Image (cartoon, grey):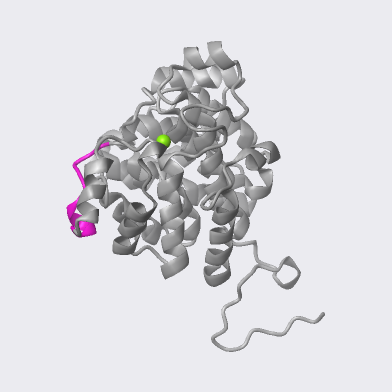
Amino acid sequence: MVPRPPQPGQKIACYNPAMSQSPPPAFSFSRLAGAALGAMCGDALGMPVEGWSAARIEQAHGRLDAMLPGRLPAGSYTDDSQMMIAILQTLAQHGGLDPAYLAGRFLALYEPRRGYGGRIDALMSRLAAGEPWDRVATDSWGNGGAMRVGVLGVFFADDEDACLDAALTQCRITHTHPRGLAGAAAQALAVRLAANLGAAGRKPEPTEFVERIAAKIEPIDQHVAQRLRAMPLLPFGDEAEARSALSWAYACDVSAAEAVPPALGAFLAAQQPEQAVVLAVSLGGDADTIGAMAGALAGAYWGLEALPAPWLAALENQSMGRDAVLALCRKICDENC
Ligand SMILES: [Mg+2]
């Protein structure tokens, strides 16, 4: 079939390699769905070992590379993915980030059994009572703004300033401390860079990658920038060496400053997405969140097709599970790619 030329004002929905000499765009279904499902895979893989030390995980499970039951059934996602789904719903509805709508989606999807941070329950009550989205946050330096933000890095892949602005805005609904904001910015900008490098077929150069993100977030918070720059020298010899180096360098806890850098380190150390996520979860601590962030980076870089099929098959798939997330990503791309 001979494709019809685009009409004036018509948006070209999809990249067709047969019709283009330019490189494929970084914002594509594969990379958006890769970031979303990559995050869900990391979240679900880390769920049963959240709060464990790296040593305890290794002792109990060896190389943890299969989804196990924990406080939720095997393959279940937690608060990280539930809040990311709210962001996807907002992009699907508005073609951009509307913070008032997003706050409403956070509230509509909220299920305490997913394991939200301690301050979120009170915050949701205030949203439910009708308080506006920009009045309910606490001065938190936690990683909650970063854990859910990766998909925005793909959505705004061609506009760094818009990516940064959206990352900060969505964070301010729940976290207003500069460290929380800087962590969210760092994760979104890192996913954006990963999507662009993946689309260009280029390997990330670790030192350059880390410095680019650190320099961009330094005006928001110097401490988070400094913790990024504390990244152990890469590449590592193997997974055990990488785990040991990242565990030594970072506390891998619920703070943005100690959770975002190891997730980025796990991505930069990995040869493929499975390794990035397994390595991130193996660090222990806030394992589901660090796994989710590494999974978003890996999925944005390598694309949906590179995520392990057994993980995708094991992911929770009820009303707002794997297939619903794929449908949201499809809708967002059809209307905005
Ligand atoms: Mg969680």
Query: Which quarter shows the N terminus?
Result: bottom right
**Does residue 157 appear in the picture of this structure?**
no
**Which residue is nearer to you in this view: 186 or 211?**
186
Q: How many marks?
A: 0
Which residue is at 65% across, 66% downward?
22
- Horizontal side of 114 relative to 133 (left or right) equals right
**Which residue is nearer to you in this view: 137 or 70?**
70
Q: Quadrant of ligand 1?
A: top left
The quadrant holding residue 231 is: top left
**Which residue is nearer to you in this view: 278 or 60?**
60
Image coords of residue 248 (percent x, y): 42, 17
Which residue is at 27% across, 52% downward?
173
The quadrant holding residue 220 is: top left
Image coords of residue 334 (percent x, y): 58, 69
Query: Which quarter shows the C terminus?
Result: bottom right
Establish if 18 lies above or below 230: below
Residue 135 in the magenta stretch? The answer is: yes
Image coords of residue 27 (percent x, y): 55, 60
**Mostly what secondary structure, the magenta segment?**
loop
Which residue is at 31% across, 57% downward?
103
Residue 47 in the magenta stretch? The answer is: no
Establish if 246 lies above or below 265: above
- Horizontal side of 79 relative to 301 (left or right) equals left
Image coords of residue 222 (percent x, y): 26, 37
Q: Which residues are magenta?
A: 131-141
**Which residue is nearer to you in this view: 328 or 124?**
124
Which residue is at 45% across, 60% downward?
89
Farthest right residue?
1
**Does residue 19 appear in the picture of this structure?**
yes
